């Protein structure tokens, strides 16, 4: 049985559990784990005050319970695997640098903020500002992969500098806001104003897009790099069809208010 | 020694270390992938005159390639790491970048890498863009057709060059039939290429020449037409033609395996004799004895 932390009951106010990462808890004695600091609102507390610790393991950590008010799960993790058996609160996987964080339910806002490496997999949906930037910072996610099997909120990939964000469902408004580079793939389409103020990078939509007037049509083609990306996503269990992988995409360049070196690729119907 | 009706000389092939890379080329059709691979591996029979040795390793199914398109792999060898890097940039740039619908990927695992796509990106004249996926950087170079995709870094590794067998037959027809069978059998081995035309060289060479400045010249001891002229001949009385297959591989094991399959196939196709080329064991560190290659070899 892997090292398992079971939340006894949902906290009254958000619990900030920044230490809950497999690489930090690996091989630690149970007493040491239970004594790790968490913040319950503005009060310092210990993990053992909220979680029952069981099992052991060196590379895998499982967290169970109603975790919607538990923030920063897996933040800063550098390796190993963290499985959240249910929903996760805000900031899940923020500043991740390696390893794999799997959330079997939904994640709250700011998941993967400032991420630099590793892989965040969300079986449910994600809130706003997925893979975005910390307040006051220009650059958001700088590396790694975020895969969301449900939908995602507004401003996904805001300030994205490097890395891949793929969402099986629909993205909210302003996806890729001020993005610097990197790739966002939306199988279920995107909301209003995608790529606003983007400088470089790629937003891929598998359905029609209401584009800003500062984007200009370039051509329709089959981008070779996109096939590599979509194959990679399919290998990771993303529901991609052959038509999406082999299809033609309209390339729109923008944002014309910036460098016009970004692109929005929109899948075209037909062969 | 004998294998079926074929005499096998109790000697060894003398092989050398060379640096190698595996290049994966994909395209919209198998034909275009093959065309690019063929072009990239052209004029690469011997480091003596071509600065590198190369060949097509095999065709790839779409399921085996990074972008799910049909493809081919080629192996390229050069004397040193720096030389290999230069040849890769030249050949991918001139033969793959230019070829319709192709993309080009590193096909070798390894921590030692050289910059290829990172050099070719400059063809994009500032309009190139990069993508990083799973720790690998790709360059997207805009071209008139659309876009050329090339991986930035290619792994290089020390391989083995100069594995060989030499096949003798009663005449050109018989010798070539046996050598073609050997080459066909060798092509089934992963990790090796046969850099000469069709995998076969008719002009095996010796080191040096009576003419100053010439690094290699004809191997008169294996020229049937000179049997009566030279002080020493290795051509038996019943042999009228000789061919050589040179094998370059990523590992010594792969080269040995190719030589073994070639030896068996040549014997099965009626070669009168099979031998191997060496320099007395003084130059190359890898000595591949024919004696140990095939279990069914028997002493006369």
Image (tube, coloured by chain):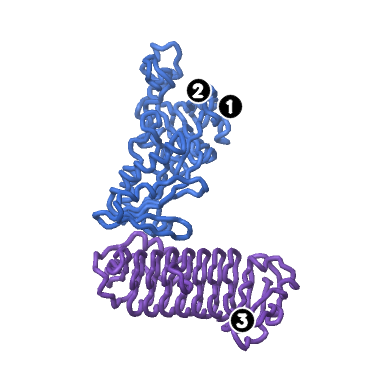
> Which label sits in the foreground, 1 or 2?
2
Question: Residue A207 placed where, x, y %?
Answer: 32, 76
Question: Residue B190 placed where, x, y %?
Answer: 47, 45
Q: Is residue B185 visible to us here?
A: no
Q: What's the residue at 48%, 26% (across, down)?
A: B277
* Marks 2 & 3, CB-CB < 8 Å contact: no
Instruction: Name the mark on residue A234.
Output: none
Q: Residues within 10 Å of mark 2 (few under 14, many from 20)?
A: few
Closest to the observer: A71 or B142?
A71
Q: Is residue B169 above or below residue B109?
A: above
The residue that label 2 is drawn on is B279
Question: Residue A145 placed where, x, y %?
Answer: 48, 67
The residue that label 3 is drawn on is A15
**Residue at the bottom extreme of this rendering:** A12
The residue that label 1 is drawn on is B299
Tell me the quarter of the picture where residue B193 sits.
top left
Q: Is residue B37 above or below residue A148?
A: above
Chain whose colour in the figure is purple: A
Closest to the observer: A201 or B255?
A201
Q: Chain B appears what colour?
A: blue
Discs 1, 2: same chain: yes
């Amino acid at each position: 049985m892997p090292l398992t932390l079971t939340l006894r009951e949902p906290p009254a106010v958000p619990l900030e559990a920044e230490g809950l990462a497999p690489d930090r808890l690996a091989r630690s004695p149970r007493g040491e784990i239970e004594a790790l600091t968490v913040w319950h609102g503005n009060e310092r507390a210990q993990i053992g005050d909220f979680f029952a610790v069981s099992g052991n393991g060196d590379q895998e950590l499982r967290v169970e319970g109603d975790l919607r008010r538990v923030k920063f799960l897996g933040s800063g993790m550098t390796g190993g695997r963290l499985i959240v058996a249910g929903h996760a609160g805000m900031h899940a996987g923020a500043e991740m640098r390696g390893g794999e964080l799997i959330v079997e339910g939904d994640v709250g806002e700011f998941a993967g903020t400032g991420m630099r490496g590793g892989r965040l997999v969300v079986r449910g949906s994600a809130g706003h500002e997925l893979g975005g930037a910390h307040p006051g910072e220009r650059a958001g996610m700088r590396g790694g992969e975020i895969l969301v099997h449900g939908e995602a909120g507004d401003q996904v990939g805001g300030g994205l500098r490097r890395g891949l964000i793929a969402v099986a469902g629909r993205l909210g408004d302003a996806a890729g806001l001020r993005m610097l580079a990197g790739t966002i793939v939306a199988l279920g389409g995107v909301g209003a104003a995608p790529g606003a103020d983007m400088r470089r990078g790629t937003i891929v939509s598998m359905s029609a897009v209401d584009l800003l007037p500062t984007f200009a049509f370039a051509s329709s083609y089959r981008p070779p790099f996109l096939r590599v990306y979509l194959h990679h996503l399919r290998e990771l269990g993303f529901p991609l069809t052959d038509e999406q992988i082999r299809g033609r995409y309209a390339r729109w360049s923008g944002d014309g208010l910036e460098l016009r070196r970004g692109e929005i690729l929109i899948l075209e119907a037909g062969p | 020694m004998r294998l079926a009706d074929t005499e096998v000389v109790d000697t060894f092939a003398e092989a050398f270390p060379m640096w190698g890379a595996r290049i994966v080329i994909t395209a919209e059709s198998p034909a275009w992938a093959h065309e690019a691979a063929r072009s990239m591996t052209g004029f690469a029979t011997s480091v003596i005159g071509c600065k590198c040795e190369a060949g097509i390793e095999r065709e790839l199914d779409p399921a085996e390639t990074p972008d799910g398109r049909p493809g081919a792999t080629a192996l390229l060898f050069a004397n040193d790491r720096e030389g290999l890097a230069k040849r890769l940039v030249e050949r991918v740039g001139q033969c793959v970048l230019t070829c319709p619908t192709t993309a080009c990927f590193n096909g070798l695992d390894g921590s030692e890498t050289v910059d290829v796509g990172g050099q070719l990106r400059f063809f994009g004249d500032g309009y190139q863009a990069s993508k990083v996926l799973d720790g690998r950087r790709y360059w997207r170079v805009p071209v008139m057709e659309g876009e050329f995709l090339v991986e930035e870094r290619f792994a290089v590794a020390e391989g083995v060059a100069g594995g060989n067998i030499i096949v003798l037959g009663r005449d050109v027809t018989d010798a070539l039939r046996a050598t073609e069978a050997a080459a066909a059998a060798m092509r089934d081995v992963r990790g090796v290429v046969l850099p000469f035309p069709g995998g076969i060289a008719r002009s095996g060479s010796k080191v040096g020449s009576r003419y100053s400045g010439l690094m290699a010249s004809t191997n008169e001891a294996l020229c049937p037409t000179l049997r009566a002229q030279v002080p020493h001949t290795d051509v038996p009385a019943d042999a009228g033609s000789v061919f050589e297959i040179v094998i370059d591989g990523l590992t010594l094991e792969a080269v040995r395996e190719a030589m073994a399959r070639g030896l068996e196939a040549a014997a099965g196709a009626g070669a009168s004799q099979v031998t191997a080329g060496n320099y007395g064991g003084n130059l190359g560190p890898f000595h591949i004895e024919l004696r140990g290659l095939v279990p069914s070899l028997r002493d006369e």
